[in-house]
Image (tube, coloured by chain):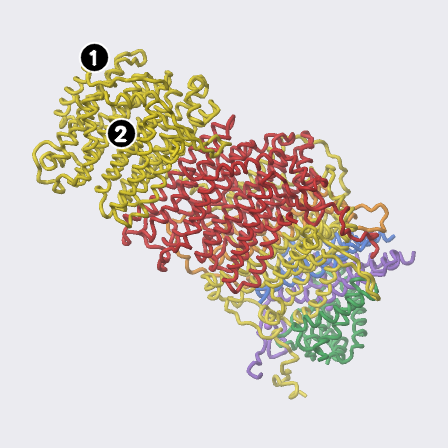
Amino acid sequence: MEALVASAIGVLTACGVYLILRLRVFAAILGISLLSYAVNVFLFSTGRLATGAAPILDKYAENPVYTDPLPQALVLTAIVISFGMTAVLVMFTLGAYLEAGHDRIDMDEVEPDIDDPITEGIALDMSAEPAEDRT
Amino acid sequence: MIAYAVTFAMACFGIGLVFSLWRLLRGPTRADRILSLDTMVINFIAILVLYGVANGTKVYFEASMLIAMVGFVSTVAFCRFLLRGDIIE
Amino acid sequence: MIQDIIISVFIVLGGVFGLVGSFGLVKLQDAMQRLHAPTKATTLGLGGVLIGSMIYFALVDGHFSFHELLITLFLFITAPITAHFMAQTYLRMHRDEADLPPSGRPVGWSIYQDPPDFSADD
Amino acid sequence: MFKRIFPHPLLSLLLVIVWTMLVNKFTVGNLVLGVIIGFALPIMTAAYWPGRPEIKRPIKIVGYILIVLWDIVVANVQVALIILLKRHKNIHSHWIVVPLELTSPEAITVLAGTITMTPGTVTALLSADAGSLLVHCLHTDDPESVIEEIKSRYESRLKEIFA
Amino acid sequence: MIEHWIIAPVALPAIIAPLIGFVMRHDITVARAFSVAGNILLVAIAAGLVGLAGNGDVYVYRLGDWPAPFGIVLVLDRLSATMVLLTTVLALIVLMHAIASGWDKRGRHFHALWQFQLMGICGAFLTGDAFNLFVFFEVLLIASYGLMVHSGGRVRMQAGLQYLVMNLAGSTLFLIALGTLYATTGTLNIADLSLKVQQMNPDDAALLRVAAVLLLLVFAIKAAIVPVHFWLPATYANAPAPVAALFAIMTKVGAYAIIRIHTIVFGPGTPATEGLISSVLFPAALITIAVGAIGVLGARRLMSLLAYSVIGSMGTLMLAISVFEPHAMTAALYYIIHSTFAAAALFIIADLVVSRRGNDILRPQPKTLQNGLFAALFFGGAIAMAGMPPLSGFLGKLLILDALRGPWMAAAWIAVLVGSLITILGFARAGSTLFWKCEQVTPEEGTEPIDSTPPPPEASFIEWAPAGLAILALAALTIFAGPAVRYAEGGATELFNPASYIGAVLDPEAKTKVFGKDKKDDSHAKPAKDHGEDH
Amino acid sequence: MSEISLLPIIAILPFVGALMPGIVIRAGRNACAAFTAAPTLLALVMLGTLAPSVYDGTVYTTHFSWIPQLGLEASFFLDGLGLMFACMILGVGLLITLYARFYLSGDDPMGQFYTYLLLFQGAMLGITLSDNILLLLVFWELTSLSSFLLIGYWKHLPEGRQGARMALTVTGAGGLAMIGGMLILGDIVGSYNLTDILAAGDQIKASEWYLPALILILLGAFTKSAQFPFHFWLPHAMAAPTPVSAYLHSATMVKAGVFLMARMWPALAGTSEWFYIVATIGLITMVLGAVIALFKDDLKALLAFSTVSHLGLLTMLLGFGTKAAAVAAVFHILNHLTFKAALFMSAGIVDHEAKTRDIKQLGGLRKLMPITATIATITALSMAGIPLFNGFVSKEMMLEEATHTVWWENPWIVPALATLGAVFSVAYSLRFIFHTFDGPVRDDYPAKPHDPPFGMYASPAFLAIFVVILGLFPGIADGIVGMAASAVIGETVHPHLALWHGFKPALYMSIVAIVVGIVLLLLHRPLDAAWLAAPRPEAKRLFDDLIRGVVGLTRRVNDVLHNGALSRYLAIFCASTVAIGYLAYSGGGLLPATREMLPTPPLAIVAWALMVLATILVVVLHRTRFAALIAISVIGLVISIGFVYLSAPDLALTQISVETVTIMLLLLALHFLPKETPVESSIGKRRLDGLIAIGSGLGIGALAYAFMMRDFSSISGYHLANSYEGGGGTNVVNVILVDFRGYDTYGEIIVLGIAGLAIYALMETLLSGPAGARLRNSGYNNDRSHDRHPLMMVIAARLMLPIAGVVGIYIFLRGHNEPGGGFVAGLVISIALLIQYMASGFAWTTRRQRMEYHGLIGFGVVIAGLTGLGAILAGTPFLTSWFTYIHLPPIEEFEFATAALFDLGVFLCVLGAVMLMLYSLSRLARHSGETVNTEPMDYDPSKAPTFFEDGYRTEEEGR
Ligand code: NA
Ligand code: NA
């Protein structure tokens, strides 16, 4: 089981890292999501794995075994925080897209000699998903 | 006997997961992918319930219920996205 | 023993239906056909498992539990809606209204046509 | 006045039942709490449910549910057999159009849901004026009889239940 | 009772912020009044805390009344008290600028985010728990994201997005590091971590060492150390000016965390990580100085120039930290205070200038009103940042150079001194372009300001007073360098003798300095119930 | 007033005085000058009261603590050398103040000028009076800064700005080197006090750090005193107004280096290193400066190179390391001050009156401005080293010392070069006199020259008198030179300065210098032509090219390094994380695993495969974004199930509900964003990224595997043991969240609240800016479903909302003991509301909205906070929970815990934040110009007319 979990963390991380290195913000959002999955599982696994040992006290159980509750609490906090962050990220992505007219992650210009006025003629694509070929 | 039944049913739903996965990867339409996700949700709920039976515990009930609820919401949202583009309008 | 058998039967039947539903997802060739399999067979499969579980906890564990009923209720409310939406999605993306039988009404099917406007009458 | 306090009495009842099923334990405390919830939540959500579906014969609901449950079980076996045994070319799918006599949105929804939940048929679309249903039949050689069965077995009962 | 004030720097803004954000969000005047009043109150509280910690006592505040290491504790020592005071004073000055310049009106929720930002920073400084440090990092980060894109705009949005993504990656790494730390030690309390890490068998310390360097990297992102500094120039250069000025403290949060964690937990003499941190941090600091200095000289925009100067100052600071030695740490603590005010002063002044020039491109333009006043203020800020006398930058630099002896000396000195020279040159060129060349440019020759809006009228006293105040703070830091260094020395000594810190946090008997008691001998004991009764 | 406290007052007076000019300038230019002169005069008078005892050998010291930890003290001391320099600085300062009053035009901001002047004067004075080398460094750098301001005083002149920057660069660089040297010196001696250091000469010279310290300190001195090869800045500093040049380049700034060498003489001089570095550089500078000076046509440039030459002379003398040379140096310092300051001021007068300083445009001024000509002639003759003027005396002494000097076993090279320097010195001095003042009166001066008012020539005239007196009776300077030289050498000397030294080689050398000098002047025209034709490095161009090159390079570095490519920043971040992590890992050991692996059921492998394939699918499909989102959902689902399996039901609940809301947010955003994007990165970048990604994945996976296979002991045993008794709950995770670590949760909900606020604020900003305009102008295409608010969905939502509400309440109430809690409950309610929003749309639902989302967040945060503060009122720390069991018949006993109140805060905050986020995102879409619905569903058949075969009729009609 540990090997499965560890390899899952590895795959999530690798794919997440690959995606955050792409040039479009949405890929980065996907990457960040994968990374936060990875990190949540990683953090969770620091309490070591156990089955059938949920940390919910049961006075009827004989010799109850409970898994480490602390990492779970930490992961909960981490999940919530990364949710907030993702939400902000999504909004920033929209903001940058609406302002700049593209969703490239790299900046247009870092040290502009002249701060050009915003490029005109940005067409927003707010349509529904394009229909696939109708058969 | 129940243990065998549970194992059998788990295997069934596990294979069901594999089938759904195949549909997820294969597509070909986006509706198919949504459908496969929806099927996975149901398979997983079944597996959770079976797991509860296997362990004689009800700790997993809330999870099953919530998964059923959010599975619905995601499916609808995905569909609405494809249908209208804007899921809340 | 009998209760074990009953429980097992429900669970096994549930598994079978679940498997068949998912199998339909793979086997059926037409997207509209595929929609039938999981929305129903799998749901029924889950239903079987839930009933098995309910009996199990009632008879074997001694706690009668309605939780499974609750999940079933949930699924019964939601499954038709999801199926409906998936069908809509598939049709919008792959079928023109002309491919479908006429609605028999002055207006066509909802995803292709706006609803009749009676605002002038109100 | 009554409508303001109990905007949806049946919903209140349903919520009390749901609550009891959730806590899974019959105690006075839970019941009190359940009643409070069953009383409060419909009021809180009443704004989203303007108007109340008029239900003439609530008793008939039980009968309807039992019929549908039975149909689900029976017809599911048929679908399973179709999936398992029939080859693609032997599956004769059809689109059928079910003209509706029901006008209550709640009733239409229940009918459409019933059609979907009973195997072999899926409600795909409503007409834009909600006057007819487009139903997909997985396999039938007589579409007209399916329409007839839907109308007689479900719609007629629903017409009795809903005003 | 007095110990309850330790929670005030967190709790006060956490109450004020929602009130401003939700109750007063339609009335900017009331929001301003509340924000300023809250900030003044915070300064007073922070000053009290500095006094409290001044004699070397370590105060521990047990949140939820749970004993360490099981609950979360706040720890007030000289270092954390100083950082809180620094934060609040800085924030007050910058807040005055934000209000005087009207920046706070250019978007929504400025004051609420501002208060939350303060809460996050103070929380990060006060906490004695590693995971809680993460939480407050996130609080301060998310508030900073909001502030960063305050008032919007294309370049700012893009820069804000980059800032956000970079820090999200950093937060992810933070969790990985914390997870590894917990997985190897089984604890999260900093004092307890210190004990556990000291006992760690060096032959089994590979994972712990990874945790140590990953944490370092996380903090290095905040502190803008090469090679994870890349986010800073675009962020600082494009943030709203008051926010950039407040961000002067943000890099210090990273520095603080390195100081706290990598001295108390992984400090010198730890068998498992001996020499590891220095060997990574020292070369990074050297390169950071170079990158900062090069950036200053090569910058084409005033805001970028200031941003690079911040990087350079962080490099210098990190150089002092990286040797993990009390004298150098003393110097580092002094330099932290200095460089915070210097950066803030410069960003405020730059805002005064830029708002009147219409842009921040370093190119001659016709001179603006009050050229001389702004030139004088800029000169003050620049010499402070570049480390020229008479302001505290020079003293800070001397302190650091004086402390960096031994094998570090040659490389460190060359980096600091050459870096200073290049920085001085960069500032001189920029100042000359901004304030001197304009004397020769007539309006026709100059480039048209981008903003076609008429330039603002002459800055009133209230508008330039915050900039003056920041410079005055630097002057005070120069004149009272003796007491300041003594306080810093006390803080540094505490860091390298963590026994008192650890003792205060973990020893339940240390009642005189520790606030909060064990649950067990609690007078208001909770009813002891047979657990599971209501199952 | 006690003498001890006078020193710091003297040192601080100019700085205090620097505040005055800016204030009194409004009272007029005379007042301004007077108020500038006043502190100088006062300081001079104070110094005068101390002078007699210093003359008698008393050394005054005062001491103030500044940074004792560093060894930086505000210590001042006054000895002979300091007194001489201080008097020079203040005295010339007074003269310059007077001169500048008349020199500056009405357009020049005089207040600024005097402020800078006093700042500079204070810095110089500080250098001479410091008894602490760190303090000396402070003043040293201050001279660089204040001279930068003075040189750049005429901001409108590019030469002024460039000259100022050049001076700052060169002297600043030297100053920084000197910091290093001084710190080493302090390290060797163990003190930064000058008195200690001067007393520890032997220790210093014996130290292995002697040479580095010497070189670094000399770098400071040489740059400041414009020694070769750093001499080039000085002529360019001539762009400053003449009073500045006269002050900086005669008595003060450039003398600082010489002063420093003199000051450090006991500590550093006397070694062969000292000799070969200092004397050689001085010699080269002296000759080079003199040669160049001859070919300068600008009066001030000529004087500047002459200054370079004379500074070289002084440096050389100090470099000789002999007592006699030191005496000569001290005397020449004094002499140079007198004639050079006067010469600069004369040149300034010429410039001021004739409006040109170009020798080639001048000549014949003797008749037009006789007073100026007289002053200039006297002082220039002194500069030439002509007998009867003071320059002759000290130059004789220099030549005398040169004859005694053996350089690299060569006895004639120093005297020969010294003579050569003297030759050129004579030549350029005479050129200054003859080519400016002699010859016929011209008619093409840019302005008609005449002598200036008395105030303007008073200062140079005063100095010229000194030149003559000291030239005729050098003995009167015995005392002061002896006093200063004693301080330099460190032991008492009694020099006997005389006009006539007898027939010594120096005399012959002087004669040769004068004769050959005159010859050179006569040959000036051909020599000048040859000089101009000869290739020679143009220092200014080289420097400019260097700076331009460096700036260009830094720009390129900036552009390349910080090019705004976040993808690359992140790649570097990831790669360095992996590398540094591996570095740390490989440096420590790892003992063998201690845990058995858990069994792996086949279903787990299926789930694993599902997740891994979905993850890979995300990567493969990341350009077709919708499909990627579905794959993301699958991952979230598997992870939730995994959490359930691995005993973490709370995590599963949270994960799955957060997951859903996140997907909603992403779908809302995806609505605006491009649906698909092309392949943009090159194959190389993709490969490299892939490599980095695989490295990161392997690293993290291996890390996780390593610790999962090893046992550890955790503090969480305490939480398990105390959760029920101390926290009142059986769900330990929840008790940790709301009690043990409630403070974390407090922070966490605040993060969410801030997220809601930030998103809302950004939305408002966007809508009010250009983005909003663009949004309003953009339209939907019509290729989308016409089913906006489907009937079935609306009906389902009506049922789901209250049921989900019940579930939410249940999850909230059970949280303390069973999986659940405020957070999940908040999300459940949010999701239920979301269903409502999806069904009936934003506008319709919002109109019926009774909740104020801002208020919910605020209320939640405040409730949580107040719960925490309530504990303080009870005398316990923030967030201390309290619980009790309440029994209300017939209802069974139930628990009341403040932790539940806290959890309520969590619930409200989560609900508010999530809804505010969704609200903000969907409000953006509202602005796209769509109409909004006024009815909950597209078409309500029960309210509409019924359809009959002939059309629609109302129900009544139908019946
Ligand atoms: Na059906
Ligand atoms: Na429609």
Q: Colour of chain E?
A: red
Q: Determine the secondary structure under disc 1.
A: loop
Name the amino acid, label 1.
Lys
Q: Which mark is residue F950?
A: none
The quarter of the image holding the C terminus of chain F is bottom right
Would residue B48 be visible to someone looking at this image?
Answer: yes
Q: Which chain is blue?
A: B
Q: Colour of chain F?
A: yellow
Which image quarter: residue F757?
bottom right
Name the amino acid, label 2.
Pro
Which image quarter: residue F202?
top left
Q: Nearer the viewer, mark 1 or mark 2?
A: 1
Dot 1 corresponds to which residue? F504
| Residue in front for this viewpoint, C44 or E33 | E33
Would residue B43 be visible to someone looking at this image?
Answer: no
Q: Colour of chain A?
A: orange
| Residue in front for this viewpoint, E349 or F112 | F112
Q: Residue furthest front?
A: F1
C-alpha gap between disc 1 and disc 2: 38 Å
